[in-house]
Amino acid sequence: MPRLPSVILFPDPKLRRRAETVPDAVFGTSGLREYCQLLANLLVAVEQADVLAGTQIDFEPSWCVLALQTSDKAVSVLLNPVIRDESGESVAFEKSASFACVPCLLSAPTKMTVEYRKVDGTRRKVECSRSGARAIFQGCESLKGKPIIDRMTAVAAHQLVQRFKEYLEERLAPALFLPDMSVVVPN
């Protein structure tokens, strides 16, 4: 039975790879639909993330695809997304699947225009703001081989890595159950 792809966690060097543009000949194929469905399913499984890039999963090819989860839990897939315009800036907490959704404060645009293609090859252009702009910005940075840690100061990056390590240790450490070793002294 083949191994199912998983989310790549920091510090895996695969997070620094650049996504491959989805070729024109692949649009509309069952292979591309399956790839996008896999990415969408992984995003839903991560639960706390609102974006997952093709470069964040352990799967080849590493295509230029983003899966975005909306507030109503629907998932949209953007292929070959390109940010055409961005404006404003806000600092807010972001969560990245590659950092096990440990939150960190980051700056991102508050409004942007994005061009992308759908699975069938149809070209789209959308304007987004607030959390949508933040998620697409984060995803596009990941597609360029830039994990969120690259957008941080050295001190903030160190703090994130420490919180990430603590989270993993808590989550992955086996619980130790020792028998009651108290001694009852008879009267």
Image: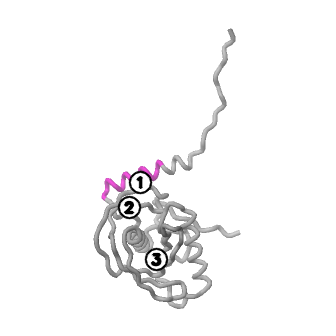
| Magenta span | 153-166
Which is more toward the observer, 163 or 75? 75
Tell me the tag on residue 149: 2
Looking at the image, is 178 positioned above or below residue 185?
Answer: below
Query: Tag 3's secondary structure?
Result: loop
Q: Amino acid at mark 1?
A: Val
Q: Residue at x 35, y 76 (%)?
A: 112
The answer to whether the residues at label 2 and label 1 have Cβ atoms under 8 Å apart is yes
> Which label is found at residue 19?
3
User: Mark 1 sits on what residue?
Assistant: 161
Q: Residue furthest left?
A: 88
Q: Which corner quadrant of the image does residue 7 belong to? A: bottom right
In this picture, is 149 found above or below 74? above
Query: Which residue lies most toward the top here?
Result: 187
How would you rate the neighbour count of disc 2 (Cα within 10 Å): few for under 14, some for 14-19, many for 20 or more? some
- The extreme right residue here reads 1
**Rendered image: mark on residue 36:** none
Q: Earlier in the sequence, mark 2 or mark 1?
A: 2
| Dominant secondary structure, magenta | helix
Residue 48 horizontal/vertical position (percent): 50, 60
Work out whether mark 2 precedes mark 3 in sequence or the reverse, and give the earlier one: 3
Residue kind at label 3, given as amino acid type: Ala
Res. 72 in view: yes
On the rendered image, what quadrant is the N terminus found in? Answer: bottom right
Up-down: is 36 above or below 159?
below
Is 3 one of the magenta-colored residues?
no
Residue drawn where x is 61% and y is 78% of the image:
34
